[in-house]
Amino acid sequence: EKGGDEYQSLCSHITTPSAAITAISLGITTRLPSLDFQQSTLLESQLGDVTSSLGKCEAMLRTPIPLGYTRYSVRFLWIWLVLLPFALVNKFAEFGVGTWWEDKP
């Protein structure tokens, strides 16, 4: 049973999503022998679509973010984090009133 051995060795070394999809594909052919040709072809077609979408996602992941967007995001986050405590002062002004730790220093 060559397909089963190949499937087991692949499952023990899965490190990427594409390897996982390959393992699923091999698992379908070895563990579901009752599928007829049409069902098997449909599943392989759908796994091909998933692989294609995965490739597009990986391409987007590897696309660098333009420097202008990075600078704008960093500036926005700094301003937001600096102003956040001032926005929360009113929310937490009455936080400790009526609690057991109210009189603790």
Image (cartoon, rainbow, N blue to C red):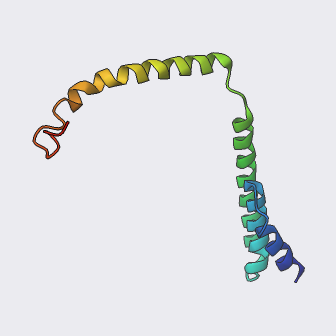
On the image, the x and y values in percent for residue 16 come to: 75, 55
Of the pair 94 and 40, the residue shown nearer to us: 94
Query: What residue sits 73% from the left and 31% below the top?
Result: 63
**Left-right relation of 62 to 71:** right
Could you tell me which quadrant the C terminus lies in?
top left
Residue at 81% in and 68% down: 10
Q: Position of residue 65 (x, y in %)?
A: 67, 26
Name, please, the residue furthest toward the right. Answer: 2
Is residue 31 toward the left or the right of residue 92 in the image?
Answer: right
Considering only vertical position in the picture, is 92 above or below 15?
above
Q: Could you say which is closer to the camera, residue 86 or residue 8?
A: 86
Report the front residue among 29 and 96: 96
Q: In the figure, residue 31 lies in which quadrant?
A: bottom right
Q: Is residue 45 above or below residue 80?
A: below
- Give the x, y percent position of residue 26: 79, 70
**What's the residue at 44%, 17% (across, down)?**
79
Looking at the rendering, which quadrant does residue 38 occupy? bottom right
